[in-house]
Amino acid sequence: MQKIKIGIIGVGHLGSIHAKIWKGNPNIELIGIYDTDIDKAKKLANELAIISYDSDAELLNQVDAITIASPTVTHYEVAIKALEMNKHCFIEKPITSTYSEAVQLIKTAESKNVIVQVGHIERFNPAIASIKDRELNPMFIEAHRLSQFRPRAIDVSVIHDLMIHDIDLMLWLIKSEVKSIDATGVSVITDTVDIANARIKFENGAVANLTASRLSANPMRKMRIFQKDAYISIDLGNQELEVFHISSDENYNPSKATTMLGSIADGLKNKNIYYEKPEVVKYNAIEEEQKSFIDAITSKSPIAVDAYSAASALKIAEEISSQANLK
């Protein structure tokens, strides 16, 4: 089978990581890269023994698919150019700067019948992968995403930079329409919101409370899921998982990783409380999302994070940003 030819536009922090992982993938051919910072692009190109192109159009002419890891404000312009040339696109999150841009991008992709996948990397986090086969019906989600300040990420607010990861996970976990949003935020160092909190209510009664900060001394990426008879704690940073659940099933056969903490009398039945710390199989999440992108192109596999999902997350991020900037 002929190898998919891949290029990368934007080789900053994430783009460089994508380039190095693509280079090691035997199933694709990394054709080259482009970045407005010519010196940086040439240095990486020399390191990987690939071509640094003088323009994005020149690179797009040589590839089947493109990874777009340029600044968010350029995503729409670059992606539309690629789509018009019938190139499959992997776009780092957020999909575009605005929801209206995302809608237009989706229309163009549909008209050209090409793949668009968005880099919401936490969908590939090994701890998240460990809960995919569990029966999930969250009624309350609490997420904290705290990061140390990094000057490279200030082209967007903390909502579009960090919180959007948890917005995407929230929408993936809670299968219901959003009913209301109440948000607040503070600008401390940059001209955009640096610390934000949002409380999102859903039509099915579920509630999510999301907090994000890029001014924390102690980084944290944690999510807690509460549902009937279960509580799941996910440490996304350390890729660890803890599960507390209640069962009255007499035939329940706990695994070796499960401990019974006690029991609760409930009418005529006893419900046992179990604690489990499942083993999380570690892997490179970016490598996995790259593989899923290629599978979507070559095998018509479902797109792991499609443009519709990414646009939905962006729409909510915009509403949170609107409220946070007013307070």
Image (spheres, rainbow, N blue to C red):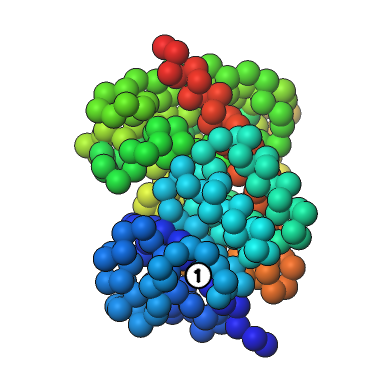
> Where residue 273 appears, x then y in whole percent?
56, 39
Q: Quadrant of the C terminus?
A: top left
**The quarter of the displayed image where residue 214 is located:** top left
Does residue 274 appear in this view? no
166 lies left or right of 295: left
Q: Residue at x 45, y 64 (%)?
A: 55
Q: Is residue 128 above or below residue 299?
A: above
Q: Residue at x 50, y 58 (%)?
A: 68
Q: Is residue 11 above or below residue 245?
A: below
Amino acid identity at mark 1: Leu
Which residue is more in the foreground, 53 or 258? 53
178 lies left or right of 148: right
- Most extreme residue toward the left is 217
Q: Which residue is mark 1?
A: 59
Q: Residue at x 40, y 68 (%)?
A: 54
> Where residue 16 appears, x then y in whole percent?
36, 64
Q: Quadrant of the N terminus?
A: bottom right
**The quarter of the displayed image where residue 193 is located:** top left
